[in-house]
Amino acid sequence: MLADGTEVGFDVYSGVTDWDGRQRTIQIDQADTAPLLGMAMLEQYDLHIEIRIGGRVTIAPQA
């Protein structure tokens, strides 16, 4: 279900990615859009976003 409440079907695949020096098995949803990073990947990480054009985005393991 999308943020606006619309239900959409996707093909789902399993894949492996290198995340913070470790290989992790992840779920990949096929969609005709730009790639998105799911919230599950960010668990136990700090995300900092400078909300401005050209703003910096950093992701770091929690201390």
Image (tube, rainbow, N blue to C red):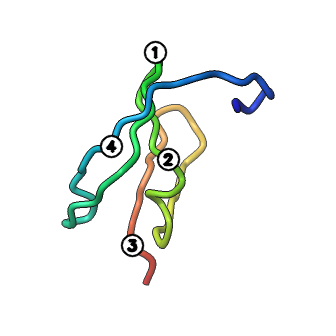
* Residue beneath disc 2: 38
Dot in front, 2 or 3 = 2
Q: CA distance from mark 4 to mark 2?
A: 14 Å
In the picture, residue 22 is in which quadrant?
bottom left
For the point 19% across and 66% down, the residue is 21
Horizontally, residue 3 falls left or right of residue 31, namely: right
Label 2: how many residues lie within 10 Å, few (<14), some (14-19) or many (20+)?
Answer: few
Report how far apart the C-alphas of labels 4 and 1 lie in the structure: 18 Å
The percent position of residue 28, horizontal first and vertical second, equals 39, 38
The residue most toward the top is 32
Residue named by callout 4: 14
Quadrant placement of the N terminus:
top right
**Neighbourhood count class around disc 3 (C-alpha, 10 Å): few under 14, some 14–19, many 20 upward:** few
Task: Give the distance between the C-alpha atoms of the residues marked 1 and 3, in whole angstroms.
Answer: 30 Å
Q: Residue at image x 51%, y 25%?
A: 10
The residue tagged 3 is 61
Task: Give me the C-alpha separation between circle 1 and circle 2.
Answer: 16 Å
Q: What residue does disc 1 label?
A: 32
Whichever of labels 4 and 3 marks the residue nearer the N terminus, that label is: 4
Q: CA distance from mark 4 to mark 3?
A: 24 Å
In front: 24, or 59? 24
Identify the mark nearer the N-term, 4 or 1: 4
Q: Amino acid at mark 2?
A: Gly
**N-term-proximal mark, 4 vs 2:** 4
**Quarter of the picture holding the C terminus:** bottom left
